[in-house]
Amino acid sequence: MTHHISEAHITSDPDILAGKSVIAGTRISVQLILEKMRDGWTIADLLDDYPRLTREQVEAALDYAAEAMGATANDNRPDTGSLRSSRVWRCSSYTTA
């Protein structure tokens, strides 16, 4: 598995979806991605239903959520308020060889 920094971004703007974390340039929230996947959707399903969405963006949303969850579960975590107040979140994506 190769790990690299992607150009995908997760943003938060109080004027878009009441400040929820979203895929940059869209109104697709990280929460929506997680809920769809919880309900059994695959990345392919998401890409079919949201044609402007890319695999890299979905992976960025998953990375963002994992980082946010790790921050709340780890005693040595950064201030979680800083995660919520960040305007742009650079995420990593994963590819398999």
Image (cartoon, rainbow, N blue to C red):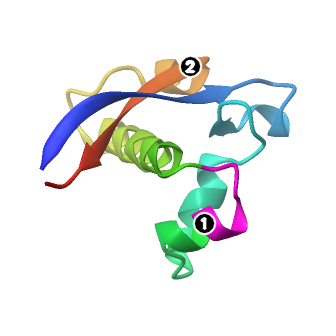
* 17 displayed left or right of 48: right
Percent x, y for residue 22?
66, 39
Res 2 → quadrant? top left
Whether 72 is drawn above or below 86: the answer is below
Identify which residue is drawn at 60% across, 63% down: 47
Q: Element under label 2?
A: strand
Q: Nearer the viewer, residue 12 or 23?
A: 23
Left or right: where does residue 51 sit relative to residue 93?
right
**Does 6 appear above or below 96?**
above
Judge whether residue 51 is colored magenta. yes
Quadrant of residue 86 within the rendered picture: top right
Type of amino acid at the residue the image marks with label 2: Val
Residue pointed to by mark 1: 46
Q: Name the residue tied to disc 2.
A: 88
What are the residue bounds of the magenta stretch? 47-53
Residue 39 picture location, percent across and down: 57, 80
Q: Position of residue 36 (x, y in %)?
A: 60, 70
What amino acid type should be assigned to the residue bearing mark 1? Leu
State the mark number for residue 6: none
Looking at the rendered structure, the secondary structure element under dot 1 is helix
Nearer-N-terminus badge (1/2)? 1
